[in-house]
Image (tube, coloured by chain):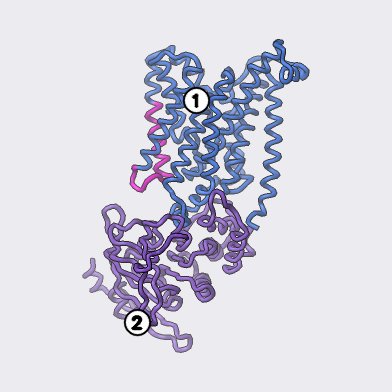
Chain colours: A blue, B purple
Amino acid sequence: MALSHARRHWLGLLVLSATLVVAILLSIVFGTKSLSLQQVWHGLWSATGTEGDIIIRSLRLPRTALAVVAGCALGVAGALMQGHTRNPIADPVLLGVSAGAGMFVAGAIFFLGVTTLYGYVWFGFAGALLASTAVYLVGTYARGGATPVTLALGGAAIHALFTALTAGMLVLDEQALDTYRFWTVGSVAGRPADITLQMLPFVAVGLLLAAANARGLNALSLGEDIARALGVRIALTRLTGMAAITLLTGVAVAACGPIGFVGLMATHIGRAYTGPDYRWVLVYAGLLGAVLMVGADVLGRVVAKPGELPVGIMLAFIGAPVFIYLVRRRKPVRL
Amino acid sequence: MTETVDIKDLAEPGPGQPAVRLRAEGLTLGYGDRTVVHGIDLDIPDGSVTAVIGPNGCGKSTLLRSFGRLLKPMSGQVLLDGTSVHAMPTREVAALVGLLPQSPTAPEGLTVADLVARGRHPHQTWYRRWSSEDEKAVERALRRTGTYELAERTLDELSGGQRQRAWIAMALAQDTEMLLLDEPTTHLDLAHQIDVLELVGELHRETGRTIVMVLHELALAARYAERLVAMKDGRIVAQGAPEDVLTEDLLREVFGLRARVRRDEESGSLLVIPLGRDRDRLEATV
């Protein structure tokens, strides 16, 4: 009886997985350079080094893989953030994670003269870690401990500080501004395949922590008093959630730049279907995040042919109308 | 559950007196540097229904929160079977004591069935999730509170009284021997207040649970509780059987209220007829 929604939920999961597979296939087939299905097949299964093979192997596959991994990470992190802050518009920006990554990337360019993506990805990750640790500490040492309000306020403060520092560095150095601009637009193109591989262990740990967090988050959504009365260790649950959020957004933002809207949209669409059970919301948000990211990337390649629009910009184009629709359809959710 | 309890620490029940499993000793509570409850000693007899009454801000909810280990004492302790609840693992306390705070809120779209299922949290672990025992406990809780037919409805769709019964069902599904209810009848009209309190009475009769609740409505407290505890300014002023506690003198002292207390011959219930505020006493306490 309590599980009567389960069938509907599994069915949705099946549809969603199929959609993701289709999106991945489209991402491999469509691009600036038109390839025949034959060339695609050749490149996938029996590459011999033709032009088509190289495009498939070293451009489209890595970029698709990165979009899947980063999209999934951002989707799950978005759901966790909304759950922990009980704020329906929480996203990486709110908790200062993007700003932290941005400042470290700018710092790497400004102070160390790093110019390659390879060089600054890990700076971005370190910045994301630092920012969310700072937010968590600010939240925890506030009177009353880490609550939805202190976390959101701490995030806003850290975001403002780091953004100002970044702007300061960029104002002083025009060349840094150019390199930074490339990162900040948010894209999955031109990232070497091993960046995605190196991200995987962090994403895997982040997803495991998120899974462990789901039940605690369900109890916390009834209020801290009830959660405690139900035997939830609040501080541990918050810490697990923050660690997962940090790992997942940290790597995604570091590799792709600050990509907004994915976590927000994936969570809202997922929850509209599953209801407020985080065990399902997290899974749906992860899959939807991947679908949205890959889909937006493909669209960006199709609409601006022969050039392409970065996925960050495409997502904003898709995200805005989706949100207007959500707002018009129903009042904002209460978490 | 495998923890051994030091038998010596258990309260020795006197002859003919019920055992005490939950008790406060020298309990001082507060928020920040503001003290709200001052060194209270209180025994909750096992299997009883106790109502805590007192004016707004007297510390009754604070006391209840501390019994449910939501609030750490500034000094003194809350003992559960002789062990300080604040020294016990969270989950272990949650398997013994359930608590329903005042006006709880649920996320939008949560169904009654899902809400009640969340009450099973302390009985689950990461390796043992939903079991047939959980299923049975949830169904029992839904049936007992008359919310079984509402199981698939979302909380937003329910009336205030139905919603409160759903929350009580959640606390019941937790399957604890002790249940703490903080103003379970707030925001309900009289008929629904009676409805909720009848349910509490039924629970007590059928399952022998120990129930402690904070109530504002004095006549209802006297009718549905076996014991009243009257508090004022963070101290216990009186406790015992309702007819001994709910007196005209006590109403004057605790609430600053001139009132008549009468017994209705037909129902045997106590009636409180308020006459007005006691101005002299009010000025003396300010």
Q: Is residue B170 above or below residue B53?
A: above
Which label number is shown at residue B244? 2
Q: Quadrant of the C terminus of chain B?
A: bottom left
Compare residues B178 and B159 and report the one nearer the observer.
B178
Q: Residue at x 58, y 17 (%)?
A: A190
Q: Would you name the residue on which mark 1 appears?
A: A254
Q: Position of residue A107 (x, y in %)?
A: 40, 20
Question: Residue B192's spot in the image, x, y percent?
Answer: 52, 70
Q: Is residue A223 above or below residue A312?
A: below
What SS does tag 2 mark?
Answer: helix
Say which amino acid is labelled 1.
Ala
Tell me which chain the residue with mark 2 is part of.
Answer: B
- Check disc 1 and report its element: helix, strand or loop: helix
* Same chain for the residues under marks 2 and 1 in the image: no
Q: Residues within 10 Å of mark 1 (few under 14, many from 20)?
A: many
Tell which tag, 2 or 1, sits nearer the viewer: 1
Residue B132 placement: quadrant: bottom right
User: Is there any visible trace of residue B190 in the rendered image?
Assistant: no
Q: Residue at x 41, y 44 (%)?
A: A149
Residue A97 relative to residue B276: left or right: right
Q: Amino acid at mark 2?
A: Asp
Q: Position of residue A331 (x, y in %)?
A: 56, 46
Depth check: A70 or B87 in front? B87
Please state the extent of the stretch shown in magenta in the rendering: A141-163
Q: Main secondary structure of the magenta part?
A: helix
Mark carried by residue B157: none
* Magenta stretch encompasses residue B39: no
Chain letter behind tag 1:
A
Around disc 2, counting alpha carbons within 10 Å, would you say few (fewer than 14), some (14 to 19), or many (20 or more)? few
Residue shown at 65%/58% (left/top)?
A: A1
Q: CA distance from mark 2 to mark 1?
A: 70 Å
